[in-house]
Amino acid sequence: MSRINGGVSYICRKAVPLFSNKSQHTPPRGPRLDAPVTLHHVILRGIEQRGIVRDDTDRKAFLDRMGLQAKASGTGIYAFALMTNHAHILRKSGPDGISTFMRRLLTGYAKYFNWRHLGVTTNAVSYMLRG
């Protein structure tokens, strides 16, 4: 039988600390619930706090891609906020799940952004976003 009391788990009378007092150690998160019709608040940030959009053309490209991917995957977009260096999306999972939608959205947008601003025309995707 397991009982948690004051950050210590008592299992068979053996005390094991659950959390370190050091702030850099956090418990691992559990698996993400990703069933159809599950709501997710997704946060996207530019690496090293870099911008993910530079102007209205980038904003339109991101939103157009998000709309196309949502329609193609059966994902519902309930709300979003697109700022210069990050974005929030409140979405409902479609049958393909969150990972497929996010991979297609972010890979395609990263290719567009790199082509437009860095002149990169290869299939290689530079890591400009992190979720």
Image (cartoon, rainbow, N blue to C red):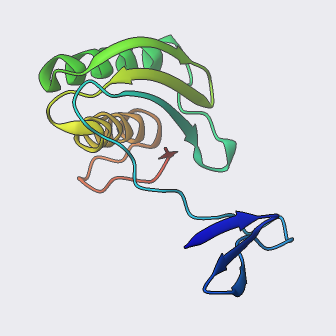
**Which residue lies most toward the right here?**
21
Relative depth, front residue between 19 and 126? 19
User: Left or right: 74 with respect to 51?
Assistant: left
Picture residue at 61% right of the left edge, 20% below the top: 83
Give the image quarter of residue 91: top left
Q: Position of residue 70 (x, y in %)?
A: 24, 20
Give above or below for 20 relative to 126: below
Residue shown at 46% from the left, 16% from the top = 59
Residue 65 found in image quarter:
top left
Q: Residue at x 23, y 38 (%)?
A: 97
Marks counted in the figure total 0
> Which percent across, then down, holds residue 101?
26, 35
> For this view, does 128 lie left or right of residue 96?
right
Which is more toward the observer, 4 or 106? Answer: 4
**Taking 37 as reference, is 109 above or below it?**
below
Question: In the displayed structure, would residue 17 be above or below residue 59?
Answer: below
129 sits left or right of 22 in the view: left
Residue 2, percent from left and from top:
59, 71
Image quadrant in which the N terminus is located:
bottom right
Q: Is residue 73 above or below residue 107?
A: above
* Nearer to the camera, 15 or 62: 15
Coordinates of residue 127 in the picture (x, y in percent): 46, 53
